[in-house]
Amino acid sequence: MSKKSWMEQRFDEGLVFLKSKERGKCFIEYIPAEYAWNPIDAEEYMYIDCLWVAGSFKGHGYANELLNYCIDDSKQKGKKGLCILSCAKKKPFLSDPKFLRYKGFEPYDEADNGVQLWYLPFEKEAELPKFKEDAKHPHIDEKGYVLFYTYQCPYNAKYVPVLENLAKEKDIKFKAVHIKSREEARNAPTPITTYAFARLFSNKVRTDV
């Protein structure tokens, strides 16, 4: 319900949620980059929140069909290109870099934790998207563990309280930061706002998706 509520508030901003006719986790979600809940500068780009094809649905061309629809739709809406988060090597819950490169995407900007901003330009002279400075150098001031999250992901409402209770039970320093607005998300100290786990260790920050 938290995910549905979050989405309903985004449709007027241009959010598109397209699900395959096949039942299961097989969908694409994208929005004009100026409305993205991520700390990026990507004027006139379309930002892909999530391209998800799971389990038995892999290997049947669904990801290709969904992304092609997004490309055609974005061009019709006058966008200069697409951008999406990934890494140099495949990581859970981030798009596969091999697939993105096959579709013509390239990485442009990279944060200190290895998260990359990939782009697919529709125009040769299109300005390249980039991370905001705070996101490019993830940081926290609190000792212990800090979790940044939004309701963009449907699982957070369930698992964040589980972590909070576990940390309390084990006497672990833990803080959950619920990002509740686009402005907060665009100024977050992490390139991923959906679910980013950070720990301050020897004056350096380690963040995981």
Image (tube, helix red, strand yellow):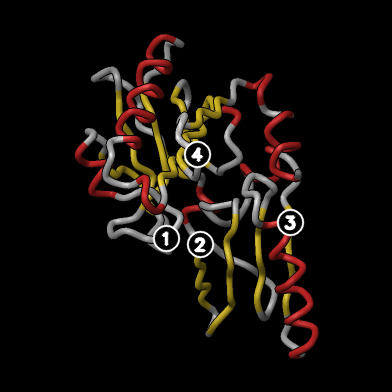
- Earlier-in-chain disc, 3 versus 4: 4
The amino acid type found where label 1 is placed reads Pro
Mark 3: which amino acid?
Answer: Ala
Q: What residue is at 35 percent from the left and 31 percent from the top?
A: 128
Q: Determine the residue positioned at 72% across, 50% down.
A: 179
- Among numbered discs 1 and 2, the one appearing first in the sequence: 1
Going by the numbered disc 4, the residue's amino acid type is Arg
Q: Looking at this rendering, what residue extends furthest in the bottom direction? A: 170
Mark number, residue 125:
none
SS class of the residue under badge 4? loop
Give the foreground label among 4 and 2.
4
Q: Nearer the viewer, mark 1 or mark 4?
A: 4
Image point 44% across, 44% down: which residue?
52
Q: Which residue is mark 4?
A: 23
- Image marks 1 and 2: residues in contact by CB distance under 8 Å: yes
The residue tagged 1 is 92
The mark that comes first in sequence, 3 or 1, is 1
Depth check, mark 2 against mark 3: the one in front is 3
